Every structure is written in C-alpha cells, then in structure tokens.
Amino acid sequence: MKPTITAFAASPDRGRGLARDMRVRWAFEEVGQPYSVRLLSFAAMKDPAHLADHPFGQIPTYRNGDLVLFESGAIVLHIAERHMGLLPDDADARARAVAWMFAALNTVEPPIVEYGMATLFEQDKSWYEERQQMLETRVRVRLDELSATLGDADWLEGAFSAGDLLMVTVLRRIERSGLLAHYPNLAAYVARGEARPAYRRAFDAQLAVFAASETSG
Amino acid sequence: MKPTITAFAASPDRGRGLARDMRVRWAFEEVGQPYSVRLLSFAAMKDPAHLADHPFGQIPTYRNGDLVLFESGAIVLHIAERHMGLLPDDADARARAVAWMFAALNTVEPPIVEYGMATLFEQDKSWYEERQQMLETRVRVRLDELSATLGDADWLEGAFSAGDLLMVTVLRRIERSGLLAHYPNLAAYVARGEARPAYRRAFDAQLAVFAASETSG
C-alpha cells in the first residue's frame, strides 16, 4: 500500500518547492518509496475533515492504513526509521542525525521564518526597516554557527542524512534574500542537496502540481 | 554510567524552570534515569570547548560515553527511545507521540518564543503595542487549535508521552502572560503536567541550582 500525503492544490510559492510537502516528497524519493498526493485548497485545509488529520490545519499530512501523521519533521523521521538511506545504521550516529533534524526545525528555521514573514507581511509598517535589521542579525548568528560547524564537509555528519535533508530545505527559504552569498560553504551545501537526483524528482513533482493549477485556474 | 547534561549556572528565568534543561531533567525523572549536571556560565557557552559539543552554543547538551547530543527535543527523544515511560509500545502510537513532539517545537513554540522575545526586547520600540497585538493573535490561533484538539482529555494521545512533556514546557512560557486563562482546558493540562512527581523533582533540582547561584553570587 502506498502512503498518501497532502499538499497545496496551488502552492503560494508558485512551484519553488518551499512548502513543507517538499521535505516529505524528497524523503520518499531518497528511500525509493512510491507515494500518492491528495491536493487541498486553502479552504479545505480548515475543514473539519482535514483538522481531524492535522490539528493545526496545515500540510503535509501522511496517511498509511490507519496511521495518520502530521508535522513534516515527524513524517520525515517516520520514513527514515522504516527505510534505508536517511539515517546511519550505528545507533549513536543515528541519534546525531536526529539532533540535526531538531536543530534544523527548532533552532535554524524559526528566525528564518520570522525574517521571511516580516518581508511578506510588514513591508508597509513604519518599523519595517529597523526591525528587519534585527531579524537579519538573528538569522546571521545562526548561519555563522552553522557555517563554522559545516566547514568544508559535504554534509553535517559524514554521510547525507535526514538532518541534511531538513537543513537544506530550511536554508532554501533564504535563497532569494542574498544572505547565503556571505557563506560560500552553506550556498554550496544547499546546491549539493538540490543536485541530488531524489531532490530533483521531488522538486519536479511539486512543480508539476503548480503548473497544472495554473493551466486549470 | 550516568549521562551528563549541561545547564545554566545562573538561569536567566531565576529558577522558573523555563530553560531547556528542564525538559531533559523531567524526561530523566519520568524514566527513572539518574543524571549529572555540568553548569555553564554565559561566557563558557561560547567557548570552543562547548561549541564542539553544541554548534549553536546553547544548553542543554547530553553526554553519555562517546555520544554527545544537542537540542532538547532530540535529547528527550533519545531518552524516550531507550527507556520505558515516555513513548507507547505500539509503533503507530509511538509515531503519533513523536508527531506531537515536533508540533510542540516547530508549530506551537515559535510564535510563543517570538511573543516572549518582543516582550523582553522591544518594549521600548515605537512599534511595540501594534506588533504585540499581531504576535498575540498568532499565538492564539495555535492555542485555539490545540485547545480544540485536546478537548477534555488529560493528554494529547491517551497516556502521557514525550509529546505532552514538550508541549507542557512550551505552554509554560506563557503562564505569566494571562493568555492561558482563555483556555481552561490548556491551563488544566499544564497544571496536570506540573503536578507529576517527576516534574516536581526536575523543577526542584533546577531551582536548587538557581538558589545556590544567588547565595554564591
């Protein structure tokens, strides 16, 4: 039985692959697990039927038989634990990879999301310029630390893992900001992730959904 | 061998148990695993020796033999996977509990941290009042959804799990804001967590560290 995930019927990023289904698609592609996608309109995301699957009315969800999961990080971990290819075999090395998953989502992503949200929603506010400097500094503190840790390695802990998968998707959110240009090793790290065949397949699949929504809309 | 974690030598919350070592202490107490604590000054957190253990120069870290972990969520998961008491036995139920761990840290905590940070650092800014309304609305959207999901249950998924442990520590961050008073079931949920004997032991242990820092300082 193929698991089914949910995704935006019309992604607000216009096919740039920044919505959180991209992480789950990429994980499926890395481990070679076929999956189905059920598309949801924005209105449908707040329907009781979807809220029963996702308490916060977001995408993606994951359904496999009776099991329903939400939170992209939890879904990627679930896939990684059940297939080869996203976590090392050694128990300690696995725990380290999982630590990077949490670091991507709880330490690096929040200031990046905050920075992006201000760009989207506060440009007309009197405080925008001053505050954006503050937010950029918070992001750069994390990028400084991440860049120092990565050094000239290809991936955060030896082989590519679910930790890298999540971290690359988090860093992609600032690709257009210009911030990554200050960190050549992080820019190369993101490019290395995007060059993986599994990433390309996942990206193309979500782009096809957006392209179809444009022609049908 | 007892694992060793790091914590603030002088917690900025003055012993209220809001620092992230509290989560790990609580997890250890729930599963009955003794642990040691190594205290760090703020200056020591940015030392190369600590940065080698924690790329982002924070607490807590976890060390057990050769394994070093960072990120409180990852450490709690590591403890929960190796001991009885924080995750259900059934595989699907475990995956659901892990989904709530990620939800606590990646969906509920970020707007709460943002709201708290503005209270701490932006009170003197011209934009404070207007922006705080916006941030409070973002927090309340998540609390509305969480409250609806919890309903009149004791815990998020039947028995207490690591997902509840993290969610309670996240909600404790707004205990003084008055926001929880709008959600009697969430206030009762937090109180239920705080009443657990394991929580009390963990709380008292971190409070003792703060009390000692006051008398020695």
Image (cartoon, coloured by chain):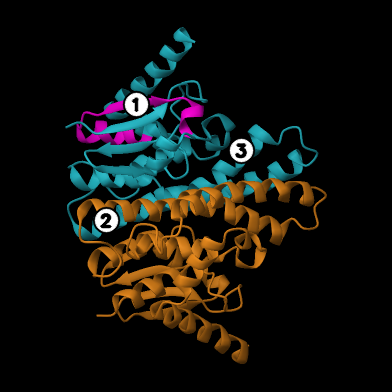
Chain colours: A cyan, B orange
Residue B47 seen in this snapshot: no
Eye-nearest disc, 3 or 1: 1
Residue at mark 1: A38
- The magenta span reads A23-45
Give the camera-side residue of B148 and B212: B148
The residue that mark 3 highlights is A117
Looking at the rendered structure, the number of numbered marks drawn on it comes to 3
Q: Relative to B147, is B34 on the left or the right?
A: left
Q: Say which amino acid is labelled 2.
A: Arg
Quadrant housing residue A114: top right
Amino acid at pointer 1: Arg
SS category of the residue bearing label 1: strand
Q: Quadrant of residue A93?
A: bottom left
Q: For mark 2, what is the residue?
A: B94
Residue A49 rendering spot, x and y as whole percentages: 40, 35
Residue furthest toward the top?
Answer: A215
User: In the rendered structure, are the residues bearing label 2 and label 1 in contact, judged by CB atoms less than 8 Å apart?
Assistant: no
Whether the residues at callouts 3 and 1 have beta carbons within 8 Å, the answer is no
Q: Secondary structure at mark 2?
A: helix
Query: Which amino acid lies under the numbered mark 3 shown in the image of this protein?
Result: Met
Q: Judge the density around disc 1: few (<14), some (14-19), many (≥20) Cα neighbours within 10 Å.
A: few
Mark 2 or mark 3, which is nearer to you? 2
Q: Residue A147 location, x and y as percent?
A: 46, 47
Q: Residue furthest bottom?
A: B215
Q: Is residue A44 left or right of residue A38?
A: right
Which residue occupies 39% across, 44% down? A71
Task: Please state which of residues B76 and A129 is positioned toward the viewer in this rendering.
Answer: B76
